[in-house]
Every structure is written in C-alpha cells, then in structure tokens.
Amino acid sequence: MARLNGFTKQQLIEVYRIMLLARELDKRILIMLKQSKGFFHMGCSGHEAAQVAAGLTINEGRDWSYPYYRDGAYTLALGMSPKDHFLAFLGRVADPNSGGRQMPMHYGQKALRIVSQSSATGTQYLQSVGCALTRKLEKNKEVVYVSSGEGTTSQGDFHEALNWASREKAPVIFHIQDNEYAISTHKSEQTAGSVYSLVNGYDNLSRYQVDGTNFFETHLAFKQAIERARRGKGPSVIVSNVVRLLPHSSSDDQRKYRTAEDLEKDLLRDPIQLFKNSCISEGMFSVEEAKNIDEQVYKKISDDAKWADDQDHPDVATALSYVYSEDDLGKETKLVNKSDNIVMVDAINHALHEEMAQNQKMVIYGQDIADPKGGVFTATKGLSNTFGKERVFNSPLAESSIVGTAIGMAVTGYKPVVEIQFADYIWTAMMHIRNEVSVMRYRSNNDWDCPLVIRVPVGGYIHGALCHSQSIDGYFMHMPGIYIAYPSNAKDAKGLLKMACRMNDPVIFMEHKGLYRQPYAATEEPNEDYLLPFGKANYVTQGDDLTIICWGAMVQKSLDAVHALELREGSIEIIDLRTLNPIDYEKLEHSLRKTGKILVIYEDNLTNGPGAEICSVITDKYFDLLDGPVKRVASKDSPIPYNWFLEEKVLIQTADIAHAINDLLEY
Ligand SMILES: Cc1ncc(C[n+]2csc(CCOP(=O)(O)OP(=O)(O)O)c2C)c(N)n1
Ligand SMILES: [Mg+2]
C-alpha cells in the first residue's frame, strides 16, 4: 500500500479532515460572533499541523493533557467534537468543558483526560508536572502533554516546571507553539534568544525545534519524545514554529501592529495548504477527493453550529453550584484521649502519621520537610523515614512549584498535603491558589476537583520581623472555594487536620507558630479516630455580659485579658472559631442573644482584616440583638518589626483586649 512518510491514504485523509474542521470552526465561530451569538474567540488557524501531529500521538483517554486556549485542533485530534466547541462558544449547559462557566477555548473534558484549564498563562506547566509525578509513582507509562505559546515561557513557572520535571525525569511533553507574537509583543521583545536555546542545560530534558507548519516533521518529534517519556527517560520540550493567521483573539486587530507584508508572508506557510499540496503532489489523494472532504467538513460545521445554537442555556438557579462539593463537612467523632499531654506541633505530626497510614494516595512535601530535619518546626519529623521518600519528600525552594504540582497530583486522585514553610512566602503560590485551586470544581462544572491541603505556619510574637510574622487569614477568607482552619490548641489541630485530609475540597490549614510548643496550647491527645468537622466553633468560657470572637493565638490572649480584669465568673463568653471558612455564625448568634455585646479580636492588621467581615455580618444580620457597638481589636496597620519593644507596639497585646472589654462592658 502506498504511504507518505509512513502514513496510509486513510490516515492522511483523517489528518486533513481534522485540520480542516479546526479551520472551519474558527471561521464559523467568527461569523457567529458577528451575529452576537457569543462573545469571544481565540483561533488556532496556522497552528493546525503541529496540534494535530501532537493530538494523534497522544493516547486519548489514557494520557493526560493540559492544552492551552489556542489548542483547538489538538482537542479535535484527541476526540473532542465540533459540537463541543460550539457549545463552549455559546456557553450552553451541555458544554463539556465548563457548562458555560468559563470563556470559550478553556478546554477540559474528563473522558479525554483533558484537565480543566484557566485563563492564566503559564499555570498549566507545574500542574502537568504534578500529574506526571503521580503517573511515575504508579509506573503506568502514561504521559502528560502541556502546551503554551512562546510568550508564556517568560513566566517563572515555565522554568520551575522544567527544573522539577527534568530532575525527576517526569513524563511530560512541553509543546511550545511559537507564532512569534504574544498578543502584539514580538518574541524579540520577549525572549533572550530562542525558547529552544533558553531550555538548554537541564539534565534529562530533550529538546526539539521543528517547523510546526509541517505535519510530518512535527509528528516525528512527538513520536520520539513520547516514546522516550514512556521509557522513563524524561521530559521533552518541542518548539514548533507556526504562523498565527488570525489576530490574537476576536478582541484584537493585528493589522495595527503587523505589516501587510508580514501577514502575507505567513499565508505562504498555511499548514493546511502545505499538507494538501504535498498529499496531492505525492499522489496520495486527488484534487477531487480533497474537494469532497472540504464539502463534507463545511456541511458538518454548518449542521453542528445550528444544532448547538438550539441547545439550552444553563439554569440560572445553578449559578452558585459547585463552589464546594455537595458532601457535608462530616460529623464530630467521639473524643477518646490516648495520652495526657501533647504540644500542638506534635499533635499535627501525629495527625499526618495517622492519615498517611490510612490513605495510600496521600503524599507530603514542602521545603526541608523530609528527615532527618523533618521540617523547620519538626511538624513532619519521622514521616519520610516511616513512609519512604516516594510519598514524603523535600520540594525545591519554590512555593509556586509546591502548590502547582500539588494541583496536578490532586486531579489524578492523590491527596497532597503540602507545607509552605512560612505564610510570609505563600505569595508566589497565590496565582495557583486564587486561579486554580479554589476554582477547579466550579469552573469545570463539578467534573474536576482539587482537594489538597496546604499547611502553613502563620503569625507573630516570635520576633520574626516583617517576613516571619505575617497573618494571612484575611486574604484567604475573601476567596470562595477554599476552606480555612486555624486551630488554637493541640486537640483541635489534630482533629481538624485529620478532617482536612479527608475532605473533598481544598483546605488552607493555618498553624500559629507561636503556639507550636506553648504549654497552654498543649492538650490531651485524641486517639486516631477523632475528627473535628469544619464550621463548629468552641465555647472557651461561657458568660452573659459580653461575647469575644477569636481564633488562633488570640484565644489565650483573650483568656489572659479576662483573667487580668478579675471579672465575676460567668461574665465573658469566649468563642474560638476554629475555622474561618466556614464560620459558625449559628453559635455566634446564640451567644449574642445572651450577651448583646460582641468584641472581635484578630492578630492580622486592622484595616480590611478578617474581623472586619465578621463585624459587618453581625451588624447586618443581628443588629436587633445588639446592646452596644460591634467592636474589634487588631494589630496596627504596619509591618511587624524585629525589635521586641517595637514588635509589642504593633502586635495586639492582652492589655489592648482588656481595655476593649472594659469599654464595651461600660457602654
Ligand atoms: C498570567 C496572565 N497574564 C496575562 C494574560 C493575558 N494574555 C492572554 S494570552 C497572552 C499572550 C500569550 O502569548 P503566547 O504565549 O505567545 O501564546 P499565543 O497566544 O501567541 O498562542 C496574554 C498576555 C493572561 N491570560 N494571563
Ligand atoms: Mg505566541
């Protein structure tokens, strides 16, 4: 049988058909956009050959994909249908990518193992590495495809991902589709040399540079790279030089920044024309046959567009569905103590040991967490010795890497419980937490979830100055989609952390480092069956004159303030929230009905801090129950200085709380 570069006539026709489908989809969607049927489009015209070459070498439904918005032809080659594309463009309920929640071209389809993608350029790289790491753990020979444009390789995450993937020989294929432009910015303003030269120097990483308008050349590179990855030899970067035949998006006009000659030159490299011409000139199919395929594709696109336009919009009653999973938050189990006294950091350590033993898919990593050090606070001591370095290991010194890879592991069914060494350094992971972790379930219409746990030491009073004292609770309470625990003692820390390890949604687990070894935060140790559900506040003291709302290190400070005032017993009710998402407003209301006065205490600085929201909810909902102003006491709006006398001035002190209690009692 005649073949061209190893491809049969039937295969070549299929390649041509998929490329054409992608091209006609672009054209049809742009027409529908002009008819105001949808509002956004990003085309793949000019990238088709490279994408179809990639899509046909990936094993659909078995390998994993992190395609980017311009990967329309890739997704078609993998098995997504034109109907699916139209549904996404039209935001319809049956859109398999997101049920109309994300903009079009944000791909995700569980059956094809296309993991839901966000709009943030570059977040996909580290996630793909995390996904590949669990493939490697399972020794299942699956590979992971991840792609982006050349501009996106300027993101630090690209380099972090190459570093981790290369060091671990993770089976990832990085496909960089170089169309020379990132919106209007030419690559000469973007990259120091070429992407190909930039990625030189990583051990175990293979590099390919191909003409991405040539299907055969690109296909060969993918074949080699994928075989190599399956054999456990490591990741590859394939840079395919392509042309962008359309503007960046439907909101862009490239004639404003590209010359007419430049645009015309690109047309000479139209990959579909090049492919068709070589198939015809090599006698693999005739002009007539090509025309026939053109007509079939045109008809299919017309029929599918019409079909999709007739499909339903999502029910508006579902707009808030799937911010969280629909499972309840669990029940408190019977408290049976197994030891007399344990400090908080050891309770956390024991919780991790117990959960690792009962969940084979749980993994733990972070900076310096492995033995013999076992973490800078020893929270993870003994874990890598007990469970091995495959499941408990040191990460590179890169917070974005830690959270990014954890997302990739979580979507494959693993339970990453990662540590950010200090809250003050969580910020480089913020893109992942805000745009990926907290929204994975919502944006994929409940198809994908990301139930990881981020343990993070927070807070001050340890002379840690500006960058080892920060409170970060206010930032994360603002973020729907992620639960927050903030225990004040050993027993709660153990029960809440064990619960977090079993929840179906992501959790930020805040551990006050000043409490780790405090005798007053030490408690009896609950046994391994004890779980404490989120959203259940605790009465630390009961009283009927005034309610104090607090959490973390402020619980003991509030107690100290009450003791210092020598008030009658039964005056002050102290409520420890334990979790900041959800907040137990029920208990709060119950208390307010008794006391009529409420004081919110938080360690974070005052302005827009976590207590501001709580005060606002109280005045909104329970105004009728109030016998005085809703008051808050917080740290000053200032960075936290090292010198202990200065530090004392900035951070909230017992005397500040005592003053506020007195003032409010007298009101
Ligand atoms: C983190 C982030 N910054 C900026 C943007 C806006 N943006 C979207 S695509 C894009 C250009 C990407 O260019 P490139 O990586 O070359 O891919 P191409 O679109 O050319 O295929 C920019 C700046 C974004 N989505 N995310
Ligand atoms: Mg580009």
Image (cartoon, rainbow, N blue to C red):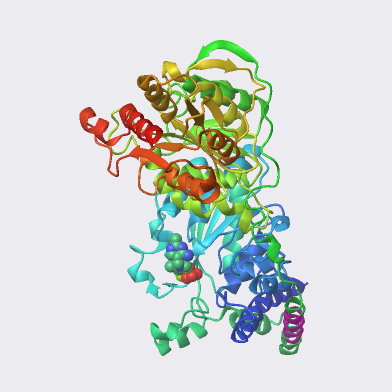
189 up-or-down from 418: above or below: below
Query: What residue sits 48% from the left and 44% below the top?
Result: 614
The residue range painted magenta reads 295-306
Task: Work out which quarter of the rendered image holds the N terminus and state it.
Answer: bottom right
Position of the C terminus by quadrant: top left
Q: Image quarter for residue 496?
A: top right
Residue 124 at x, y = what percent?
53, 55
* Residue 203 visible somewhere in the drawing: no
Q: Main secondary structure of the magenta part?
A: helix
Return the residue nearer the eye: 267 or 416. Answer: 416
Q: Residue 93 versus residue 31: which sits nearer the camera? A: 93
Task: Name the residue rendered at 44%, 28% in the picture.
Answer: 555
Left or right of residue 666, residue 320 in this image = right
Residue 441 on image: x %, y %: 63, 52
| Residue nearest the viewer, comparing 623 with 191 | 623
The correct choice, above or below, for 607 with respect to 556 in the image is below
> Is 448 on the left or on the right of 405, as rendered?
right
Above-or-below relation of 632 to 74: above
Q: Is residue 428 magenta?
A: no
Where does residue 131 sit, x and y in percent of width and height?
Answer: 59, 47
Taking the magenta stretch, the answer to whether it contains residue 296 is yes
Q: Residue at x 51, y 31 (%)?
A: 575
Of residue 295 and residue 120, the one placed in the foreground of this image is: 120
Give the total of numbered labels.
0
Q: Is residue 462 left or right of residue 277?
A: left
Res 330 seen here: yes
Quadrant of the rendered image containing residue 661:
top left
Q: Residue furthest top?
A: 340
Give the image quarter of residue 387: top right
Residue 294, horizontal then vertical, whole percent: 72, 85
